[in-house]
Amino acid sequence: MNYLVENTSHEVILMTVWCDTKQAAYAISDKVKRIDLNVQLSYTGLPIATLWALHRFNKETKRIMPDIVVLTRAVGAFLASFASWNGRKIYESHVPLKYMNHQWLYPLMLRKNTEVVCLTHGDADDFTSMCSKQGCSPLVEVIPNFTGIVTQQQSNYNSKVVVAAGRKCYEKNFERLKNLWSKVEKNYPDWQMKIHHETKDMVSAYLEGSVFVMTSRFEGFGMVLIEAMSCGLPCIAFDCPYGPRDIIEDGKTGYLIPYDDDDMFVKKLTYLMEHPEVREQMGRAAKESVKRFSEELVMKKWKQFYESLPY
C-alpha cells in the first residue's frame, strides 16, 4: 500500500473489518485512506458478525466503486464468496490454502472468478488444482514478499553463532530445533545457538551469526530466511510445505533438508560449522540471490499484475 501511494498515481484505501484498538504493526503512509467497518466480533458472535461485515462491505464498496479489491484471510474469502458488489476481487494468500480454516469457502470464492495471488509456488499449485476441480479458471499468480532489510554489512563468517528467529508458535517447531542442537553442541562446546523471538534489532542479530537455521512444520513464506540471506547468512531449513523451497537454492545458498531427516540436518549444520570458507561462499551467494526479493522487483510484479487485469 505504501509503495503504491508513494510511487504511482493509484489511490489506495485500507478497509479493516473487525473493531480493533491495537496499534498497527507497521507504519502506514498518511496517503493511504482508511475505512473501518467497525464490526465488533466480541459483542455479537461470529455468525452475526460475519453477516454484518458482509453488509458493511457491500455498502462501502458500492459507495466508493473501487477498480480492484484485495482481500485476505478467511474473512476475505467469505466476503469474496458472498459479496453483492460485482467488481474485480483478488484474494491474497498469506497462509497456505491447506492450513486455512473454513475450507468450504474457497471453492465458492474461486467460482466467483476471484483472482488469487500466492507467496509460493506450492500454494499456487493447490489453488490451481482446486480451480480445476471446480471447473473455473481465475488467474493464479505467484508474487513473493519483499525484504525490508537492506544492508551493505555482511556476517563475520568466523563467528561461532548459529541463529534462528521466529514467533513462539506451533508451526515454527523450535522444540525440534532445540533437540537437534542438543546433538550438536556436545561436540562443539565453543559454538552457541541463539533463538530470537522478539528482538528489535534483527539486523544486528543476523550479523552476529554465521549460519541461519529453520525447523518449521510449515511456512506461509519464510521472511526470516530472506532477512538472514540479506545479511549474508547461509540457511539450513527442512523442506517443509511452502516457503523454503522457493527461497533456498540447495547446495548454493544453503541446504534444503528432507523433512523427516534429522540426521541430515545435523550433518549439514556441522559441516558448515567446520568449514568457514564454505559458510562464506554460500553466504555471499545468498546475499546475491536474495536480491530477487527486493522491494523494487517485487512491486514491479504487482504493478504488472494489476495492469494485466481486464476491466
Image (tube, rainbow, N blue to C red):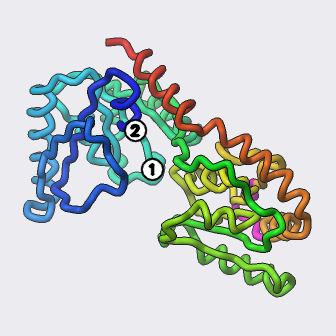
The magenta segment is: 256-263
Residue at the image point whose x is 34% and y is 50% from the top: 27
Label 2 amino acid?
Glu
Residue marked by disc 2 = 92
Measured Cα–Cα span from mark 1 to mark 2: 9 Å
Q: Is residue 128 visible?
A: no
> Of residues 95 and 111, which is closer to you in this image?
95
46 shown above or below 269: above
Report x, y in % for residue 171. 52, 65
Name the element at disc 1.
Answer: loop
Report x, y in % for residue 271. 88, 66
Can you tell which quarter of the image residue 234 is in? bottom right
Residue at the image point whose x is 48% and y is 20% from the top: 304
Residue at the image point whose x is 76% and y is 64% from the top: 210
Residue 95: mark: 1
Examine the structure image and report whether residue 257 is included in the region drawn in magenta: yes
In the image: residue 55, left or right of residue 118: left
Question: How many marks can you see?
Answer: 2
Can you tell which quarter of the image residue 265 is in? bottom right
Name the element at disc 2.
Answer: strand
Residue at the image point whose x is 90% and y is 69% from the top: 274
